[in-house]
Each structure stands twice: as C-alpha cells, then as structure tokens.
Image: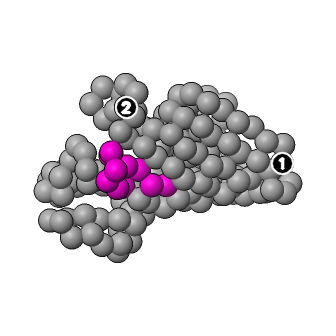
Amino acid sequence: ASSISLGSKINYRISSMGAIDGLQYETALHKRWLLGVLGGWRPDYTNYSFNTKLLQAGGYLSYTTGKTNANQESKLAFVEQHNGRQVDRRFAYFQHNNSLMKNLNLFGSFEIDLYQAINGRITHQPSLTNLLLSLRYKLSKKVGLSLAYDNRKNIIYYESYKTFIDRLIDDETRQGL
C-alpha cells in the first residue's frame, strides 16, 4: 500500500521534525518495511508561516514487527534543510518504540547532525544532537509510571536563527532525568 500527501502535515513516523509543507510519499516495500520520501519546506522559524526559502528534502525507512504482545517499530531518516541556496542543517534521525512486555514500553530516539559550518569552515563530523530514552510501565488504565532521560541540545541552523555561541550557552540547561 502507498500513500501520498500534499500540504502542511506532521508525519508521525518522523514527528520530531514538526510540520512539513510539501509532498510526502510512503510505500510498503514488504510486509514489515516502509519507505518514505519528503520534499518541500519547513515552516518559518519566527512565526510558523509558509516560507519558500526554507527548503527541505529527505527520506526514511521504517520496520515494524507487528506482533500482538511485543510490537516494535524502528525508523531511520536522513534529511537536508536549506535556507535559500545554503545548507542550514543535514542530519540523521533514529527512533525506536518497543513493547518489551505487557504494560512495559521502551521509547528511544536520537539525532546526529552531519554538517557544521563554523566561522566559514564546513565539516561533516557526526555530532549527537538529541538523545531521548523513556521507559513507561502501565499499572492500570488510569495509573502509570515513567522514567525518562533527555539529553537534547538546541539545534543549530547555520544559515538562520541561532549561532554556534547561542547553542553553547543554551546547551547547559537542556538535560534532564
């Protein structure tokens, strides 16, 4: 089965990217494998409006086990974002959701930036941008326990919004357990 969408939409398979203004296409490669591509624009970073200068394109691969008691889904995405003709950000994104056993769920995601432009020097050294791990246990329909580790860094868009120095200052306040 395949699906296509045009317009502004949040894709739940790569939901941390937020809304994608443009074209999204997804197709089943096999019973458990999905391939998706996206092309279009990201919303303006100042007011969330449509901005034709903020181009983005990428793709993702998703694998699902689909077992009744132990459902697992893993996703790997690669995305490049621009501001005008300049690369703003290039990154890889991985997300995994796993029902370890009845009432126990593990969720994890991370992003690795694959592009840096600091003082006019471009490098492609991988850098861990975000890491989130969450364990949730459902005691009953109304009560649950969760434990999470969050080590998210502010993302640098090299051609728009934040500078490298801004990110260093903000990083000190974005970790938690």
Q: Residue at x 30, y 72 (%)?
A: 123
Q: Which mark is residue 108?
A: none
Whether residue 167 sits left or right of residue 31 in the image: it is: left
Whether residue 39 sits left or right of residue 48 in the image: it is: right
The residue indicated by pointer 2 is: 51
The residue indicated by pointer 1 is: 68
- In this picture, is 137 found above or below 74? above
Q: Residue at x 71, y 45 (%)?
A: 26
For discs 1 and 2, the disc positioned in front in the rendered view: 2
Which residue occupies the foreground of this view, 175 or 87?
87
User: Can residue 150 be seen by looking at this rendering?
Assistant: no
Q: Residue at x 22, y 43 (%)?
A: 161
Which residue occupies the foreground of this view, 169 or 45?
45
**Secondary structure predominantly adopted by residues drawn in magenta:** strand
The verdict on residue 81 being magenta is yes
Q: Residues within 10 Å of mark 1 (few under 14, many from 20)?
A: few
In the rendered structure, which segment of residues is drawn in magenta?
Answer: 79-89
